[in-house]
Image (spheres, helix red, strand yellow):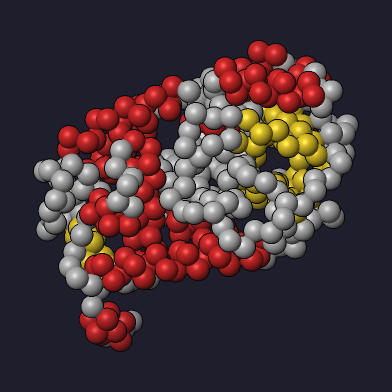
Amino acid sequence: MLASTEPPGEGVSQEPRLPGHIARLELPTPYPVGPVNAYVVFGRCLTLIDTGPNTDEGEAALLDGLQALGVAPEKVQQVVITHPHVDHHGGLDRFLRHNPRARVLAHMGAAPFFGGSPEPRLGFYRQWLREAGLPAPLIPAVLEGLRRLGELEPKAKPQRWLQDGDLIVMGDGTWRVLHTPGHSGSQICLYHESSRVMFTADHILPQVSSNAIVEPAPGPGAGRPRTLVQYLDALRRVAALPIELALPGHGPPFADVQALVHERLAMHAQRLEQLLGRLATGPATVFELARVLFPHADHGQQLVLALSEVQGHLDVLEAAEQVRPDSDALAGTGAGDPAAGALVYRAVDAARRAHGMSGGGG
């Protein structure tokens, strides 16, 4: 699920018109991000892209929207899930009750979010929240919120698992699957090369900046994904494509993808400088830094998103050898006792970094 810490983008111009074979359905959600988009692609393979949330209101809006388009639910041949956040895929079971024969497609990395238990994820988040320095009394409420979200995930499993570069038919056209991890490890975009139309889902949004949410390792023995590092790489990859129309997961369609990507990259560069400036004054935990950057994100999902935003930027700085984590020291949080095992991050001295790069050799 997405909610953003960023204001509306300034570089987005007037909403462009959709092609005649594509319709956008705006569905209500109970989440801070507001409405979510589902799309219908008309043609020989009638396709629904995303189903909205697992709520009565979301289900009613989806069915009403299909009816207004003259589409009976049982006529939908396939459902493509762009990523497994409950505002996008939570309503899948509800839709399949109206059309159990629809084929479901999703990225192969999304498998744990269809019919799986949230418990393994909760174990990961418990440990990460401790390392982030979240005060121990706050952790149970955050985990309970994550548990409730997990309970809203669908039980149905996709019939086809997608990967980067796959081609799928939607409507009358062939679309290329682009794996664009970051906001979700199994986020996909869908690109129609000849018309230069892309379903960007939550990878690029016109009115808010996508959050690269911290996620568990994709498999046993793998380390925690550096989600913002992945996101920035995928953002540049998408920006290199010729795109004339982008259809996002939230907000209106937009045209100038390159300008919006430039704006997002500039925002992230500014945030990196903010964190370096703060760390120049002394070490800090992820939680301490989040309180500086996002002072109003103090509970629930907004707190998780704020911590993820800071963690992601620290990952970028660590990859650039500009900061390093230190488990031997612990900064005070100023908000109760910090969780045991918290990491502090320190700025790496420029002279020491230069010495390390010039010294030694093989």
Name which residue lies at 27% across and 30% down.
Answer: 141
Asked whether, in this view, residue 255 is left or right of residue 288, the answer is right
Instruction: In the rendered view, tell whether residue 21 sits above or below residue 15.
Output: above
Asked whether, in this view, residue 199 is left or right of residue 144, the answer is right
Name which residue lies at 57% across and 38% down.
Answer: 83
Who is closer to the viewer here, 243 or 166?
A: 243
Say if residue 148 shows up in the picture: yes
Which quadrant of the view contains residue 143? Answer: top left
Name which residue lies at 36% across and 49% down.
Answer: 306
Residue 235 position within the rendered picture, expressed as x and y whole percent measured from the top left = 58, 59
Residue 180 position within the rendered picture, expressed as x and y whole percent measured from the top left = 58, 51
Who is closer to the viewer here, 250 or 156?
A: 250
Who is closer to the viewer here, 252 or 240?
A: 252
Residue 179 position within the rendered picture, expressed as x and y whole percent measured from the top left = 61, 49
Asked whether, in this view, residue 142 is left or right of residue 21, the answer is left
Residue at the limit of the structure toward the top, as seen here: 97
Instruction: In the rendered view, tell whether residue 147 sits above or below residue 21.
Output: above
Quadrant assignment for the C terminus = bottom left
Q: How many marks?
A: 0
Residue 78 position within the rendered picture, expressed as x and y whole percent measured from the top left = 74, 28
Who is closer to the viewer here, 106 or 333?
A: 333
Say if residue 307 shows up in the picture: no
Instruction: In the rendered view, tell whether residue 66 sits above or below residue 100.
Output: below
Name which residue lies at 54% across and 54% down.
Answer: 8
